[in-house]
Amino acid sequence: MIIVLLGPPGAGKGTQGERLVARLGVPKVATGDVLRAAVKAGTRLGLEAKGFMDRGDLVPDRVILGIMKETLSSPETAKGVILDGVVRTEAQAEGLAGMLKEINRPLDAVLVFTIADDVLIARLSARTTCDHCQTPFMDMAPGTTCPKCGGHLVRRKDDEPDAIRRRLEVYTAQTEPVIHWFRDHGAKVVSVDAVGTMDEVEARALAALGR
Ligand code: ADP
Ligand code: ZN
């Protein structure tokens, strides 16, 4: 089962992705997490990605296509995978479609989380994120200890106002067209209203998947 999660930053893809992992029994891969881990570890990938990420820009397609390829060829994703934020440009959508064709696996669904910009800006500006397990929190100050893993809660650089604005612009300009690309190429694209409690949104996501 291969599911693509699309939606603007702050729409709750990560949270809902985790819930789908629990429900569907397949792992999740989030390119944002992979890249942040690489930045933290100081690898070449991380050094290349850091500037783009801090500004709120997309890292080059080539980098993402590499992560995608690795993900799909890993034994962990043999039963399926939830791709969270992995596809953000038409070139990446095309790349994914090509890779899936090559390994003869279908794309089961594209879930598009929809939400208004002002709600997103409010959410992202209030958010802190664990620098270890990456869990986001809405009501905890930077510097607090992560209740899940004991890590350190930080304000992500790209959750500063300028970068938030940039990420929303990038989403509209580069990622929204991906929704149409998938529709035009016969994928099952379903919108999920991302405003509501986490449980409500989860129920909508499951319904969208026919569960
Ligand atoms: P969000 O979706 O909330 O902006 P993520 O944690 O998913 O945050 O991603 C953080 C950053 O990682 C993005 O702003 C971008 O710089 C980079 N990134 C992640 N996925 C991709 C992708 N598919 N293509 C290009 N850049 C990406
Ligand atoms: Zn943590």
Image (cartoon, rainbow, N blue to C red):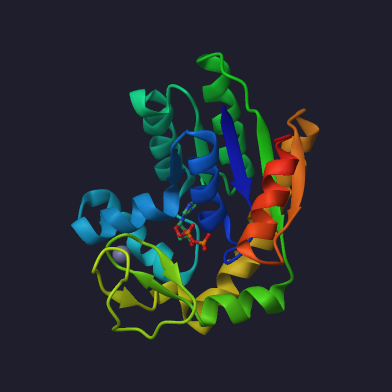
The residue drawn where x is 36% and y is 62% is 134
**In x, y percent, where is residue 202?**
64, 52
Answer whether residue 134 is visible to the viewer in this image: yes
Answer whether residue 85 is visible to the viewer in this image: no
Q: Nearer the viewer, residue 71 or 48?
A: 71
The answer to whether residue 80 is left or right of residue 128 is: right
The answer to whether residue 202 is left or right of residue 139 is: right
- The quadrant where ligand 2 appears is bottom left
The correct choice, above or below, for 68 with respect to 164 in the image is above
**In x, y percent, where is residue 117?**
70, 73
* Quadrant of the frame with the N terminus: top right
The residue drawn where x is 39% and y is 75% is 157
The correct choice, above or below, for 210 with respect to 18 in the image is above
The residue drawn where x is 27% and y is 77% is 145
**In x, y percent, where is residue 37?**
29, 55
Q: Residue furthest left?
A: 42
Q: Nearer the viewer, residue 34 or 195?
A: 195
The answer to whether residue 192 is left or right of residue 167 is: right
The residue drawn where x is 38% and y is 54% is 33
**In x, y percent, where is residue 139?**
47, 81
Quadrant in the rendering for residue 41: bottom left
* Quadrant of the frame with the C terminus: top right
User: How many labels were placed on the picture?
Assistant: 0
Q: Nearer the viewer, residue 175 or 131?
A: 131
